[in-house]
Image: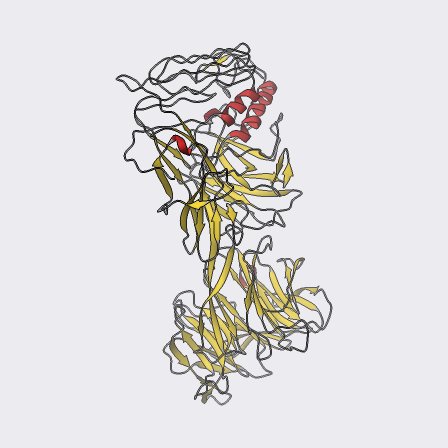
């Protein structure tokens, strides 16, 4: 396709048929799709879904980012805060780092507007609205779906880092303000892929480490981190020979350091008299502070920090085997073997009772009016409708009858029920369909959910019988995404956590930054904190400077703990590297010398988890040219090219030495720049190009720029000439616009 003379690419040509306009614009969009750089800071916590923020506060969210189906995955992409004057593309592309061309991209020329591999979003009233593009909603919002695959159209995300990106469309190809990217990984890839070269572990690897051990709560049986008071409630039994007192009861700890704030050791027994009582299971929190809990054998009590004793009732019947909040604030759901009851906490009166075919434990899902009752002995899972208090469905547990009882928990966000049985976790959706089986090397004992990050935490305990070769006395903590079940953090070994003295339990701080895990056999609670290896969020780019010019190479990364940076240089083509002395800031700034021509630079980000290095970038230093003068600097020749389809030399830069920046956008003052094979912006003589398809940037600051070609109309808006859409795309990919400013300071060259 060739442009109509005097018409910029993408301008609706008058008099053409709708079909031809659709096809031509689609070809332009598809070809330019691979030639526009992207970049934005992205959370290192690679969870699903994931959100990134753009340079103007745009918010981009992708519904699934890890464990994607390599064959085909449909993802939902949402945005808000985008500009209403610029169209954008949404697509999956090779992520070459900040300010680097994301090429190639998935998808091809869409001749019908029916492609699902990319989307074009335009301002309301745009000429292409309704044909190939959809319009932004109020506030620069959009909500689209794209279908992505690991491999296709020259893109292979198994070999390269890929991201879902937004960026300005081909009509504003140089506009970097719409650039936002979110890294994605397909099944079998590390979640950290795409964030630089991880030296010790993949970039952006999430893991947990032990930060403290609390031994002030006897033999811990159950945990609850109170959502309002933020206190850590621990249901505990006595651990003989570890203290001079009977430690059973409800302990209230400071979650920061494990110090005891309160200890409620007594609760009313069968006669109503107070007695020392363990806290076996915590049902849930009370408003403000305090919890409802079960104490042996049939007690239902409540207490808060500072209470001398619990208040409670003693139920008739058999031993309580599970407990959860009721359907009203005044009631509690109680399992006494196969009997499920809802009782009044104040009186112990049962308001509703249901006898099931079998089972001992359950998990309530009040948001969906359901309760899931597990019968491990019979290999069944029963669904109870809380409104009618009747069984509304029964489902088989894989593995059949006799599985070792672990846990039953519901994900409040999705309604899925997670059942721990033997060395597996069975995940059923809210309708009772088995959707996933997670297999571990230890016994599945408890699960907790963080709705803020969409993650599930599972604690596994070793069997503790060392005569069994499968046992080693060490348990495990695992973390999964609740949507795709992909591993969301490195497995963490829990030394000494075995099941011989009771089942482990856990509690998760909202957001997942801190996790608490009990070890009854050891009489301790381990506080775990999240850590993330450095993930590069802004990568440097190759740059060209003149002798004596100040240059700045910038890179940024995030991680937990916050990483430090050390710049490194190679003088032998990346064969060997050494640290640049004193270069420990995000920007490496120095004065370019011709001796440094061809030097390569990279940033190494380090924290306690590992080291991540950026890709190496090359510095090209050219000889300084004279110039400088009033009314526009004097540039060098635009250059002449006689070869077919070739590109002329730099428009040249005159005047005083300025600053050349690599990595991120730059701004210029009075001095101007020459573009290579694109629009020239340097004050200088007219650039010319001879030969088929050649283009040369002309002057803008000090002289008029022209370009001559033998085979295409000129683009009046830019002064460039286009032979074809392919050549235009190549020009955008190859052009490197140098933005100069007068030097604010000079430093010695970086080696």
Q: Position of residue 496 (x, y in %)?
A: 55, 74
**Residue 158 found in image quarter:** top right
Left or right of residue 544: residue 357:
right
Q: Nearer the viewer, residue 100 or 17?
A: 100
Q: How many marks?
A: 0
**Residue 461 found in image quarter:** bottom right
**Residue 333 found in image quarter:** bottom right
Above or below: residue 40 compared with residue 607: above
What residue is at 52 percent from the left and 29 percent from the top? 35
Q: Nearer the viewer, residue 3 or 76?
A: 3
Residue 519 makes an appearance in the image: yes
Q: Position of residue 139 (x, y in %)?
A: 42, 37
Farthest right residue?
Answer: 400
Left or right of residue 591: residue 113:
right
Residue 666 makes an appearance in the image: no
Q: Position of residue 270 (x, y in %)?
A: 51, 88
Q: Nearer the viewer, residue 113 or 327?
A: 113
Q: How is the image coloured?
A: secondary structure
Above or below: residue 737 compared with residue 515: above
What residue is at 50 percent from the left and 20 percent from the top? 9
Above or below: residue 237 compared with residue 31: below
Q: Nearer the viewer, residue 227 or 635?
A: 635
Q: Position of residue 582 (x, y in %)?
A: 35, 47
Farthest top residue?
Answer: 710
Q: In which quadrant is the N terminus drawn?
A: top right
Q: In which quadrant is the C terminus drawn?
A: top left
Farthest left residue?
Answer: 630
């Amino acid at each position: 396709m060739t442009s109509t003379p005097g018409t910029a690419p993408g301008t609706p040509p008058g008099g053409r048929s709708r079909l031809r306009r659709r096809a031509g614009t689609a070809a332009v969009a598809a070809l330019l799709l691979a030639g526009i750089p992207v970049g934005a800071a992205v959370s290192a916590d690679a969870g699903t879904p994931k959100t990134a923020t753009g340079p103007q506060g745009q918010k981009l969210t992708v519904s699934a980012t890890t464990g994607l189906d390599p064959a085909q995955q449909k993802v939902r992409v949402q945005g808000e805060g985008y500009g209403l004057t610029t169209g954008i593309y949404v697509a999956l592309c090779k992520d070459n780092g900040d300010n680097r061309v994301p090429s190639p991209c998935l998808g091809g020329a869409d001749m019908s507007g029916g492609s699902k591999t990319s989307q074009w979003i335009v301002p309301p009233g745009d000429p292409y609205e309704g044909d190939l593009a959809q319009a932004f909603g109020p506030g620069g919002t959009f909500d689209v779906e794209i279908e992505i695959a690991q491999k296709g159209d020259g893109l292979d995300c198994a070999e390269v880092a890929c991201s879902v990106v937004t960026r300005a469309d081909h009509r504003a190809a140089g506009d970097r303000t719409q650039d936002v990217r979110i890294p994605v990984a397909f099944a079998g890839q590390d979640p950290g892929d795409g964030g630089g070269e991880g030296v010790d572990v993949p970039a952006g690897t999430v893991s947990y480490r032990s930060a403290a051990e609390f031994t002030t709560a006897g033999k811990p049986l159950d945990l609850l981190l109170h959502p309002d008071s933020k206190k850590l409630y621990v249901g505990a039994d006595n651990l003989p020979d570890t203290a001079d007192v009977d430690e059973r009861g409800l302990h209230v700890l400071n979650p920061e350091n494990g110090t005891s704030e309160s200890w409620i050791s007594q609760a009313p027994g069968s006669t109503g008299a107070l007695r020392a009582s363990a806290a076996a299971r915590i049902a849930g929190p009370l408003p403000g502070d305090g919890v409802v809990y079960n104490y042996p054998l049939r007690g239902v009590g409540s207490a808060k920090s500072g209470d001398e004793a619990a208040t409670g009732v003693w139920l008739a019947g058999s031993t309580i085997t599970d407990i959860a909040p009721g359907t009203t604030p005044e009631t509690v759901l109680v399992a006494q073997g196969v009997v499920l009851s809802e009782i009044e906490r104040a009186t112990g009166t049962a308001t509703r009772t249901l006898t099931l075919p079998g089972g001992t434990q359950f998990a309530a899902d009040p948001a969906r009016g359901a309760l899931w009752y597990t019968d491990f002995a019979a290999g069944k899972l029963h669904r109870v409708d809380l409104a009618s208090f009747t069984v509304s469905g029964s489902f088989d547990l894989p593995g059949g009858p006799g599985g070792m009882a672990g846990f039953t928990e519901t994900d409040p966000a999705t309604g899925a029920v997670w059942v721990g049985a033997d060395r597996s976790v069975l995940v059923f959706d809210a309708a009772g369909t088995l959707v996933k089986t997670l297999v571990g090397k230890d016994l599945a004992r408890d699960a907790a959910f963080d709705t803020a990050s969409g993650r599930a935490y599972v604690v596994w305990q070793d069997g503790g019988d060392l005569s069994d070769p499968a046992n080693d006395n060490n348990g495990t903590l695992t973390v999964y995404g609740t949507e795709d079940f992909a591993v969301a953090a490195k497995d963490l070994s829990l030394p000494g956590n075995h099941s011989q003295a009771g089942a482990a339990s856990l509690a998760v701080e909202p957001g997942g930054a801190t996790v608490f895990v009990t070890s009854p056999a050891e009489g301790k609670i381990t506080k775990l904190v999240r850590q993330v290896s450095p993930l590069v969020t802004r990568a440097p780019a190759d740059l060209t400077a003149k002798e004596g010019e100040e240059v700045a190479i910038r890179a940024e990364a995030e991680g937990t703990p916050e990483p430090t940076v050390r710049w490194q240089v190679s003088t032998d083509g990346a064969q060997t590297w050494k640290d640049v002395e004193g270069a420990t800031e995000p920007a490496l700034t120095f004065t370019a010398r011709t001796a440094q021509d061809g030097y390569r630079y990279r940033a190494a980000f380090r924290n306690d988890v590992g080291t991540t290095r950026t890709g190496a970038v090359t510095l090209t230093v050219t000889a300084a040219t004279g110039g400088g003068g009033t009314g526009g600097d004097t540039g060098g020749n635009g250059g002449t090219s006689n070869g077919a389809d070739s590109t002329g030399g730099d428009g040249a830069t005159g005047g005083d030495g300025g600053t050349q920046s690599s990595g991120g956008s730059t701004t210029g003052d009075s001095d101007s720049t020459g573009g290579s094979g694109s629009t020239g912006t340097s004050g200088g003589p007219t650039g010319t190009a001879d030969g088929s398809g050649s283009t040369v940037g002309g002057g803008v600051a000090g002289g008029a720029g022209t370009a001559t070609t033998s085979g295409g109309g000129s683009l009046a808006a830019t002064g460039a000439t286009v032979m074809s859409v392919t050549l235009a795309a190549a020009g955008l990919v190859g052009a490197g616009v140098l933005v100069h400013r007068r030097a604010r300071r000079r430093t010695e060259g970086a080696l």
